[in-house]
Image (cartoon, rainbow, N blue to C red):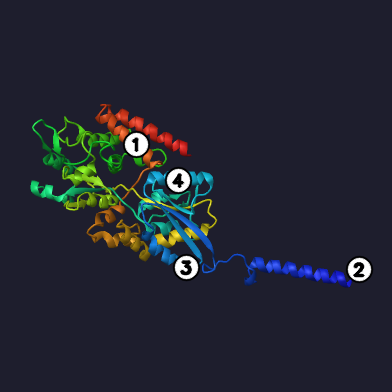
Amino acid sequence: MSLTHSQKVVLLIGGAVVVAIVLVIMGVIPGLRTTTNDPHQMKAALTVWGVYDNQDAYSGALQNFATIYPNVTVTYRRFSNPSDYNSALLDALAAGTDPDIFMIRNTDTPRQINKILPANSASLSLLQLKQLFPQVVTQDFYRQNNVYGLPFSIDTLALFYNRNIFDQAGLPLPGTWQSWEDFLDTVPKLVTKDAKGAITEAGAAIGGNDDTIPTASDLLSLLMLQNGSKIGDQGAPSFTGDLGIQALTFYTQFADPNSKAYTWNDSMQNARDAFGQGKVAMIFDYASSLPELKARNAYLNFEVAPVPQPKNAATPVAFPDYWGYVVSRQTKYPTIAWDFILQAATNATVANEYAVRTGKPPALNSLLYQYQNDPTLSVFARQALIARSWDERDKDAARTIFSQMIHAVVVEKERPIDALGAAQNAVNQIIQRSY
């Protein structure tokens, strides 16, 4: 059957339309493409939420990103404290208005995993992650064969000591110690009491709970991880074995008036205040607290040493507390958002500028090696390489549970095994609820 002239025209036009559509889909006609793989042509508006840091901290990251994605805008929102941040983020996640990129604590990945997108394995493999960052980053942010976040900084618990007090007492400095036994031997030599036997100057802020020692629960976690207790077992931490009892007993002896190591009680002032006033010779704290301590007393002559280790420990352990940057599952720009994190976290020049601007210890292995002789951050740089965490799941809740455990032993005189059992049950309930 022959076609009329009109039918031939219709078929010709229809065929041309089909071919054009195919060419558009294949990208052969660039003038008609609605999307592009060229970063210079991509348009997007990213939002980033963070805690503590001012936008100035990210100036290097923003400038570098703008050279790659000139048509992508990045808006940063700063929160001054974790409580306000967590509350705002929770509301935003529930309402579907969460930012494209936000921060989570290093132990929050299992709890937030359904809300965040992993990196494309072609962009960041497990091998690359291990080469770029210390082992603790893999421990905290690698789940289900995917990388879920990256840090810009890794902070660890260290020993801060008043140099004047040590010099006046003629005692070896903590940096020369070999183990916790040296710490245990030194503390009583630094305690000063009044005529009634009350402590007026403490040897160290240790033994109490978080009411007076802000890092008490973290310090107890460190002791448990160092002595090999099963607190480090992922998904089902166990506190109640002999090693857990040993760690809790060692810690709480410093708040026991009947112990030779007695140096602290919960009627004393906040450990950071006491340290700033020269009323305690040693505290355990993070690099993030350095500005606060210096602001309290600009003339305080203090130095930082690594945390003590168990005697003859085969593997030294430090305890971390840091944040990672993640991409929301609800973002419209998953590739661009993850590229921002990758460019900021893995570019040594950009990462170093962040460290310089914030005064925080870096996270990249290459920078950690460079900072090992830094007068301020060397201890934290070295400790990041040996940092280990445990499955706290909810950092704030875990700290409360550990603080209550310490209080139960020190004040309520519970047996360590009973206090540990109650803490273990409480932590495991949190873990079970998060699955």
Q: How crowded is mark 3: few (under 14 residues within 10 Å), some or many (20 or more)?
A: some
Query: Which element carries disc 4, helix, strand or loop?
Result: helix
Between 128 and 304, the one nearer to me in the picture: 304
Circle nearer the N terminus (3, 4) = 3
Residue holding disc 4: 88
Query: Which element carries disc 3, helix, strand or loop?
Result: helix
At label 4, which amino acid type do we have?
Answer: Ala
Residue holding disc 1: 400
Is residue 179 in view from this perspective? no
Give left or right: position of 208 versus 423. left
Residue holding disc 3: 68
Q: Which of marks 2 and 3 is in front?
A: 3
At label 1, which amino acid type do we have?
Answer: Thr
Quadrant of res 204: top left
Residue holding disc 2: 1
Q: Count the marks: how many?
A: 4
Is residue 248 in view from this perspective? yes
Q: Assess whether mark 1 and mark 2 are in contact (beta carbons under 8 angstroms).
A: no
Between 428 and 7, the one nearer to me in the picture: 7
